[in-house]
Amino acid sequence: MSPHFDDTLGALFLGHMFSMLLYGVTSLQTWIYFRRYPQDPLVLRSLVLFLWTIDCLHVVLVTHGVYIYLITHFGEAIMTLKPTWSLIMIPVVSSISNCIVRGTFAYRLWKSSGRAILIHIIIVTLSLCIVAFAIFFSVKGFFVSSWSQVHRYEWAIYAGFSSEMTVNIIITVAQIRLLRRFRTGVRFRSVDALLHTLIVYSINTCFVTSVCSILGLVLFSALPDGLLYYAFYFVVSKLYLNALLANLNARSSLQESLHHPQNSSAEPPTVIGTLSTVTNAGDKPPHDHLDQGCGDV
């Protein structure tokens, strides 16, 4: 590793800082969700609570790893060469959380697309592969004595980041195609405006998560002696979880914008795969179809 600490301890410190910032947003959105939607199914509320618990564990692991380097072994430069068990565990915790979130969006895609199966098999398979790559990397990481030895298993990092980017794009493209099917032309302008907003936000969120994956790949390849790439493991899972919570918490705003488009300025937050407006396909007019979907997750 580099004798300077900017791309090692500095990267971990900045990653921890952004991770804590996003954790605050996640916790706030979780509180808003339970306060605003107590009538949601028990399964969904349990899933949100479980994901928030994983996020808490993720924060504990990140904080422990950074604390060990910066406080417990302050001034011991040799210790920065050795991975801590908590940092080695982060890819596993992050990938499990991401897999659950993607599974939630994949289920909603499957439900609202007439139960098409092929694309969802691809999404689930890639998501499980990402978890497998993370588990392999972490298990091997327990048996290395320095960060430089991690590069023996660099293929798992490349495969993980690449699969992450690929599955993001697949989910977003599938969602955009689905949303475009419900455009009505001139009959329901408020519905079309809402669909357009959802499509734009979906693209934006896919862009953010994909950029994280691309930067992780580039930094791992270009700066193999640093830990800049590892900082992205600190934030990616929180981007996914915040996307899901934003999607759930936006339902009341979506309903208001459908019923009172001339008075409502509310816009749904950036989300991955926002499908709460189209979860029950049927023969109803598009306006009724979207209205029902806004209240059903």
Image (tube, rainbow, N blue to C red):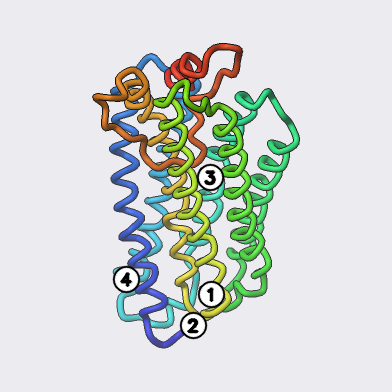
Q: Amino acid at mark 2?
A: Met
Q: CA distance from mark 1 to mark 3?
A: 25 Å
Q: Is residue 41 visible?
A: no
**Disc nearest the viewer among 3 and 4:** 3
* Mark number, residue 113: none
- Where disc 1 sits, the SS reads helix
Q: Amino acid at mark 4?
A: Leu
- Where disc 3 sits, the SS reads helix
- Mark 4, Cα crowd under 10 Å, few <14 / some 14-19 / many 20+, is some
Q: CA distance from mark 2 to mark 4?
A: 16 Å
First reached walking from the N terminus: tag 4 or tag 1: 4
Please give the residue where the numbered disc 3 appears in the rendered image.
Answer: 98
Please give the residue where the numbered disc 4 appears in the rendered image.
Answer: 70
- Mark 3, Cα crowd under 10 Å, few <14 / some 14-19 / many 20+, is many
Please give the residue where the numbered disc 1 appears in the rendered image.
Answer: 147
Please state the total of marks drawn on the protein image: 4
- Residue beneath the point at 67% across and 45% down: 128
First reached walking from the N terminus: tag 2 or tag 1: 2
Name the foreground residue: 241 vs 251.
251
- Residue beneath the point at 37% across and 70% down: 69
Please give the residue where the numbered disc 2 appears in the rendered image.
Answer: 1
**Marks 1 and 2: in contact by CB < 8 Å?**
yes
Q: CA distance from mark 2 to mark 1?
A: 7 Å
